[in-house]
Image (cartoon, helix red, strand yellow):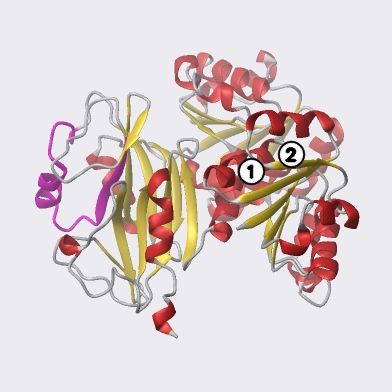
Amino acid sequence: MKVIICGAGRVGYGIAERLAAEDNDVSVIDTSATLVQAIRDTLDVRSYVGHGAHPDVLAQAGADQADMIIAVTLYDEINMVACQVAHSLFNVPTKIARIRAQSYLKSHWSDLFSRDHMPIDVIISPEVEVGQMVLRRIALPGATDAVRFADDKVAMVAIECLEDCPVVNTPLLQLSELFPDLIATVVGVWRHDKLFVPHSTDQLETGDLAYVVCDREHVRRTLGLFGHEEQEAGRIVISGGGNIGYYVAAAIEERQPKTKVKIIEADRARAVSIADSLSRTVVLNGSSLDQNILVEADIQNADLMVALTNDDQVNILSSVMAKRLGCKANLALINNPSFQGFTKTLGIDAHINPRAVTISKILQHVRRGRIRAVYSVQKGSAEVIEAEALETSPLVGKPLRNLDLPDGVRIGAIYRDKQVIRPDGSQKIKAKDRVVMFAALDSVRHVEQMFRVSLEFF
């Protein structure tokens, strides 16, 4: 696949890195010569210094032969114009744009991005995507990661196996026998900084991070089975009243009226603005690194501190301070990958990588075959994939035990007729089933192949 990426920042670099590693033909455009040089020095891609919306620059990058353009510059308007030019002059089939300004995304302007106006096939709103991820993490205390698939009926949760975890040292097959009515399957394990896909005879160990695919209705029971009985936060302090912080607070007001929320926002004008827009949330103007402000926010009695500013260091330090002052748990937004490796040692319970969230959203449109959703884990070491089985798929009609699945792939759930089915050896996949599976990076291409339309179909 030939892909043009406009924007060589963290998200653009991350997408280029993933696609180049999979032998795609990738070209990257950015106005910054420094960012372009960094990509030239580290990735096997073509790179160009220039404006991503200019026709001559797109032509130089090979837009006339491109299958897809992904516009992820810092500016919404450049991203939109780049997609328009790619469509009007070069007839690029698939156009993806990152758009941050919420005013463009209001429902009554939905026709703006239609093919007859501004032809963008996929719009990525990082603030909304990250905000939804934060809300899922708040709703599932005890899970270090959480994402939904199959019309929100299937969940993937990452669960840390602590010292008192009841399921360690027990073969996974035996767990299935002990809890036959629990629709949950361990599909991946992160152990000693390495990821592997377990077999039914494998056992979990203390310190493992287990990736579990389960029926959404069984998530809390699954967490309890792993020894995580944490209660949902009733008092939350949010550091940062930007787009994400505001989105999270507004959603909590709507969905959880009993939850008490306070926001600490450093910019006075912004603090006044969101205070006027929110009905029950208390907004404090000040720095979340100021101990007096934290005490004023009653951090010592809070259940959860959620740090969502644009500054990683502020998020990390305010999260640590909150715990020291008595807050029960914390969750921090961290952009810089180099900071993410030592969050646990600092006392940060969980973190969210907004770049990974955005890249996952884009990957589902890059993947070939009937791929409905993709979520990348452990810096791209593996993906959780939801795919629709076609009549010609080699998976259809055979008992799962007889399938020749590639190494590094484990099926977590089957979604059929609005029901979630736990896979076992006798289960057969039918056409139109949606299959949620865990695939190590080396096996992703095999998964794509299994869900592609065969020429025999025609």
Measuring 64% from the left and 26% from the top, which residue is drawn there?
297
Instruction: Give yes or no for contact between labels 1 and 2 (Cβ–Cβ under 8 Å).
Output: yes
Please name the amino acid that badge 2 sits on: Ala
Q: Give SS at disc 1.
A: helix
Measuring 63% from the left and 38% from the top, which residue is drawn there?
44
- Please name the residue that numbered disc 1 is placed on: 16
Residue 106's image quarter?
A: bottom right
- Please name the residue that numbered disc 2 is placed on: 8
Residue 458's image quarter?
A: bottom left
Please name the amino acid that badge 1 sits on: Ala
Q: Is residue 430 above or below residue 229?
A: below
Q: Residues within 10 Å of mark 2 (few under 14, many from 20)?
A: many
Q: Is residue 117 visible?
A: yes
Q: Is residue 392 magenta?
A: no
Locate residue 428, reporting x and y percent: 21, 71
Q: Is residue 245 visible?
A: no
Q: Is residue 206 above or below residue 410?
A: above
Tell me the number on the disc at residue 314.
none
Q: Is residue 206 left or right of residue 437?
A: left
Q: Is residue 17 above or below residue 309?
A: below
Q: Is residue 3 left or right of residue 145?
A: right
Residue toward you, 9 or 315 = 9
Locate residue 25, reporting x and y percent: 63, 51
Q: Is residue 317 left or right of residue 103?
A: left
Q: Residue furthest bottom?
A: 458
Measuring 14% from the left and 51% from the top, which residue is drawn there?
176
Q: Is residue 395 above or below residue 240?
A: below
Measuring 50% from the left and 36% from the top, which residue is drawn there?
379
Give the mark nearest the N terminus, 1 or 2: 2
Locate residue 140, reporting x and y percent: 42, 43
The segment highlighted magenta reads 166-189
